[in-house]
Image (spheres, rainbow, N blue to C red):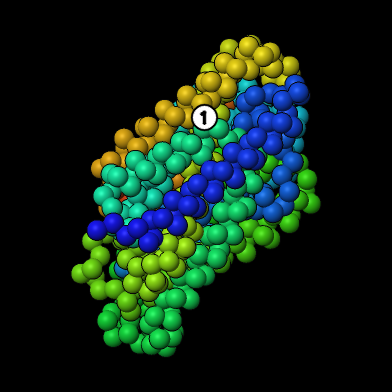
Amino acid sequence: MTNYTILIPIVVYFIVLITYNLSNRYRDYQKTKNQNVDVVKNYSVSDRNLGALALAMTSASTYASASSFIGGPGTAYYYGLGWILIALIQVPTMWFVFSVIGGKINLFANKYNCKTVNEILLARYNSKLLVNLTSLILVVCFIASITVQFIGAARLLQGAVNIDYRTALFMFAIVISIYTVFGNFKTVAYSDVFQGFVMIIGSILLLAFTLYYIGGIDVALNTIKQRDANLFDPYNKIISPELYFSFWVLVCFGVLGLPQTVLRTMATQSAKQRLKAIVIATITLFVIMTCMHLSGFFANAVLTPGQISSPDLVVPNLITQVMSPVLAAIFLIAPMAAIISTIDSMLIQSTSTIVNDLALNNFKPINSQNDIVNAKVQTKEPNKQLKVKVAIRITTLVLIVCAVIFSINPPNILIWLNILSFGGLQATFLWPIVLGLFTNWVNKFGALASVIVGVGTYAFLTFSGFKILGLHQIVPALIFSLIALLIVNTLVRSKN
């Protein structure tokens, strides 16, 4: 039977969120309607003047996705404290990204008026072939990531509200369609501030109520030790030193190559605001990652393995066990907020990539870096503005439909599908972005070789299941892509 006590507060939250987002969009429209605004820029990065709080929350909320609230804690339930250590590797991610590439990205974005991450590559390498290739990979990986979020939301509703999975999926898709189709980067960022606080409060509440239900930390630890002492071993089951290193590469170092994170560094031109955002985002991620994964671990003192058919159902079952229906509904809003924050940012970036990088930019006569600054499709004319706006809305809806179709028959564990798309993006963007920003000797041929070898290696190792020295597939993929970049770059330079 459907649990309406939990469902109704969630529906109310969706209505409040949509209303808040649409009101932000209306205010932004009123502010810009009489200005000569670039439609794509306003949609993808707005005015690039976000404050520290908005920048921090949109960065942390986008990063803390369904896997942080559902898949990660569910994995901690099975693998114990070792998985919590792995999860905490993610805490300094925003500090790392904003410190290392934040300044350089903004220099390029200002100089060449870049609106997307792929335009950064276009400005640096003057290669439409490179940009078309990276754009296609970005869209494919983002559709996979968006699919993960849809599955996570549907499973959350399925487990906690007791409704059919597909019903939950279609209901959530309708909400996302209304929420994102009429928004832009700025309206989503301000909504993320609200949702970020919801995520922090929700994760703290779950940990507190779980420990209260069990009877305290000592009781929880003793109960888990009696049930399975191996959960206290940091190297139990699948966890090994190679996995720790692999995840440091995947969820910390490699995040330098994640387009959704790189785009956030373009959201403000103020170094002072970026510095404040680093502190706020790091604290936010620490609270969310620690509380959620500890809750998943302590769930071993509440739930028996027989109750759980999938790691993704650990959190939904835990909240219905340790919280009253009203409190469970309030908590469910937290992972929903994380999921919506991730989906909206990826949809905006995917749509911008298709409309701007794959469509509009391919009709610009780009022969030099000066052309990148000067050659513009005249989207500021009212007629063409309208066409671009319509293209943006239609593209967003098509992406949502694709994600729903792929979500109908989901895999058993979200975190691995999310990691698969993470790795594909890193293998594509990491070296062209990092080496392209910090060196002037890398050319477009080396960057192309890096993308082709990196993605090819990652895909082969992932789908074949082959591992080198026990490392996650992303590690050799990044090593081989770097080697390919250096070899091709050197050969082309020598020949020229």
Quarter of the figure that contains the C terminus = top right
Identify residue for label 1: 351
Q: Is residue 121 visible?
A: no
Total marks placed? 1
Label 1 is placed on what type of residue?
Thr
Which of these two is toward me, 108 or 449?
108
The residue sitting at 76% across, 24% down in the picture is 35
Depicted 242 relative to depicted 38: above or below:
below
Quadrant position of residue 75: bottom left
Quadrant position of residue 46: top right
Secondary structure of the residue carrying numbered label 1: helix
Quarter of the figure that contains the N terminus = bottom left
The residue sitting at 46% across, 36% down in the picture is 177
The percent position of residue 464, horizontal first and vertical second, equals 27, 43
The percent position of residue 99, horizontal first and vertical second, equals 69, 52
The residue sitting at 48% across, 30% down in the picture is 396
The percent position of residue 122, horizontal first and vertical second, equals 62, 25
| Number of residues whose C-alpha sits closer than 10 Å to that of mark 1, classed few (under 14), some (14–19) or many (20 or more) | many
> Left or right: where does residue 380 sit relative to residue 13?
right
The percent position of residue 315, horizontal first and vertical second, equals 37, 64
Depicted 307 relative to depicted 471: above or below:
below
Depicted 496 relative to depicted 309: above or below:
above
Which of these two is toward me, 233 or 270?
270
The residue sitting at 54% across, 47% down in the picture is 17
Q: Is residue 267 visible?
A: yes
Which of these two is toward me, 79 or 356?
356
